[in-house]
Amino acid sequence: MKASHLSGIVVAALVMTTTSVSQTKSLSYKQDVQPVVKQYCLPCHLEESENPSDLFMDDFEKLSKGGRNGPAVLAQKPKESNFYLKLLPDPPFGKQMPRTKKKLKDDEVKLIYDWILQGAKP
Ligand code: HEC
């Protein structure tokens, strides 16, 4: 009885360790963010789509140029980055992104947050 109780604790501890390892994984635009952008933000934010926001996500360089409302990504400051803020239900201007019914899952929003917090690496 006691032994099985203990092994439950050991398993829980192991799971927690694994989770924290994946949270400290170093995120990059190419590996982690681009697939999300492709799935949810394109083709609206391709340069050829003439998006009125002037924010283009053809690649990391274009995204880094920002849009009509200034820089989209401020490294290490997700709470000041439009690229993250526009994913929230009540963004500082305009509508919540993406402007489609298909919203990001919570862990995808968190991924964008963490990527910016880690320094928004290419
Ligand atoms: C259906 C088309 C569409 C999709 C899909 C879309 N956007 Fe947008 N986006 C727009 C339009 C139109 C605007 C300008 C109006 C506004 O700000 O709400 C905009 C504006 C923005 C801005 C503000 C840029 C600035 O400087 O004004 C950000 C940031 C942004 N989008 C991020 C995203 C992200 C991130 C995704 C994917 C998760 C996404 N959008 C998906 C159409 C879209």
Image: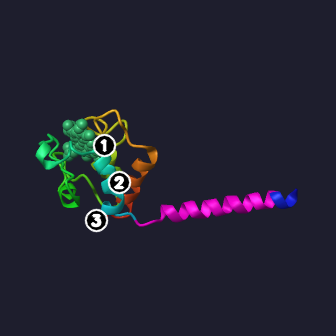
Q: Is residue 102 above or below residue 118?
A: above
What residue type is disc 3 on? Pro
Q: Earlier in the sequence, mark 1 or mark 2?
A: 2
Q: Tell me which corner region of the image, top left, top right, bottom left or bottom right, holds residue 6.
A: bottom right
Q: Most extreme residue toward the top, as rendered?
A: 101
- Residue 88 seen in render: yes
What residue type is disc 1 on? Lys
Tag 1: Cα neighbours inside 10 Å, few (<14), some, or many (≥20)? Answer: some
Real-space CA distance between mark 1 and mark 3, rounded to the nearest whole angstrom: 20 Å
- Residue 120 seen in render: no
* Residue 71 appears left or right of 10: left
Q: Tell me which corner region of the image, top left, top right, bottom left or bottom right, holds residue 19.
A: bottom right
From the Cβ of disc 1, is ligand 1 less than 8 Å away?
Answer: yes
Q: Most extreme residue toward the right, as rendered?
A: 1
Residue occupied by mark 3: 122
Mark toward the viewer: 1 or 3 = 3
Question: What secondary structure is marked by label 1?
Answer: loop
From the Cβ of disc 3, is ligand 1 less than 8 Å away?
Answer: no
Question: What secondary structure is marked by label 3?
Answer: loop
Residue occupied by mark 1: 86
Question: What secondary structure is marked by label 2?
Answer: helix
Q: Residue at x 21, y 58 (%)?
A: 59
Q: Is residue 65 magenta?
A: no
77 and 111: which one is in front? Answer: 111
Residue occupied by mark 2: 78
**What's drawn in magenta, residue-wise?**
5-26
Mark toward the viewer: 3 or 2 = 3
